[in-house]
Amino acid sequence: MKYLAFLTIAVLMNACNATKTNNKDSGDVSEKYASTITAKDLKKHLYIYAGDEMEGRMTGSKGQKMAAEYIRNFYQDQGIPSPIEELNYYQPVPASYFKRVKDAKDSENVVAFIEGSEFPDEVIVLSAHLDHVGIDDDGNVFNGADDDGSGTVALLEMAEAFKQAVKDGKGPKRSILFLHVTGEELGLYGSAYYSENPIFPLANTVVNLNTDMIGRIDPDKEATPNYIYLIGSDKLSQELHDVSEAVAAKYSSDLELDYTYNDDNDPNRFYYRSDHYNFAKNNIPVIFYFNGVHADYHKISDTPDKIEYELMEKRTRLIFHTAWEIANREGRITADKL
């Protein structure tokens, strides 16, 4: 009897140890893939994406087409497929859609897709806008390194991290759509077009995590630069807000989540001024990640050399961890505040 009791205890202890080990391994998975997102790689992409050759990426321009091609080529090279059809990563947005825009030209959103292993019909949309404001009459290029070159290359790095997880047999349970939208600077046109012509039903869209300007420091935050502004996380879903807070506490405890611009009375009205809003107005929970404006906002001086790459790495990893948690948790995030 003593032997049997000892054996039973040993089995239980082994099971507990195995559970602890499994939990630890599970927790480390997100860290493992987040660590592939590096300041070095973000910088490499951004110096190309926000370089003079892209001519400021004005919607429909030659430079914007080059930017879209850069994004498409990245996904092809990484083996991340299109959700439209093989090798076609463009969702066309016709010139006629850009109402109130003088001399509008045809443009396109760029999309890539990782299918979920358990809940493939539930889709998390990670978005950033690929356009900027072009060239002025004197030939000066508005590089838009922060706005929104930073969000664009952050999406590329997150996509690569998720793809590596797929290669290792640890891909997300829910699907991920990487959505690079055009026409944001003209009036959120690309995201509006997607919301009206979704590749996946909006009813199947779990959340939108939108990344627009995450590479600089707001002058008001110079004394405490380890921060990121979050906007919208609790507008439609307390559950999303709580998950976001928990993820930050676990993986990014040195990064302050600042809700200054989440205030309903914020005179800047940033909640309505980036692409997440076209998801929010369709009752899809959103988070808008933002570093705030700075002296180079919408000026020719918004260049890659002024980006805080180490800080941008921290912010991108936070967004990745949040997406990872939403993609892999048991229950789907819901709009529980409607």
Image: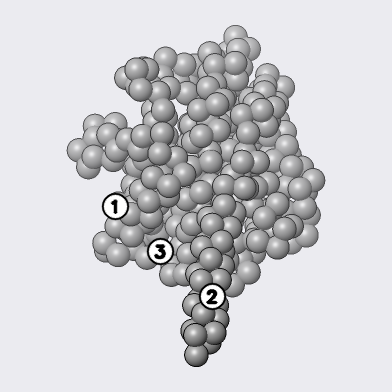
Query: Which label was assigned to residue 333?
Result: 3
Residue type at mark 2 is: Ala
Of the residues under marks 2 and 3, which one precedes in the sequence? 2
The reply to whether residue 142 is visible in this rendering is no
Mark 3, secondary structure of its residue: loop
For the residues labelled 1 and 3, the Cα–Cα distance comes to 13 Å
Report the residue that reaches farthest toward the top.
138
- The disc at residue 235 is 1
Q: Residues within 10 Å of mark 2 (few under 14, many from 20)?
A: few
Q: Earlier in the sequence, mark 1 or mark 3?
A: 1
- Which residue is depicted at the point 53% across and 22% down? 308
**Compared with residue 203, is residue 277 higher up or lower down, i.e. above or below?**
above
Foreground: disc 2 or disc 3: 2
Q: Which residue is mark 2?
A: 10
Q: Secondary structure at mark 1?
A: loop
Question: In front of the other: label 1 or label 2?
Answer: 2
Q: Amino acid at mark 1?
A: Lys
Q: Residue at x 51, y 53 (%)?
A: 323
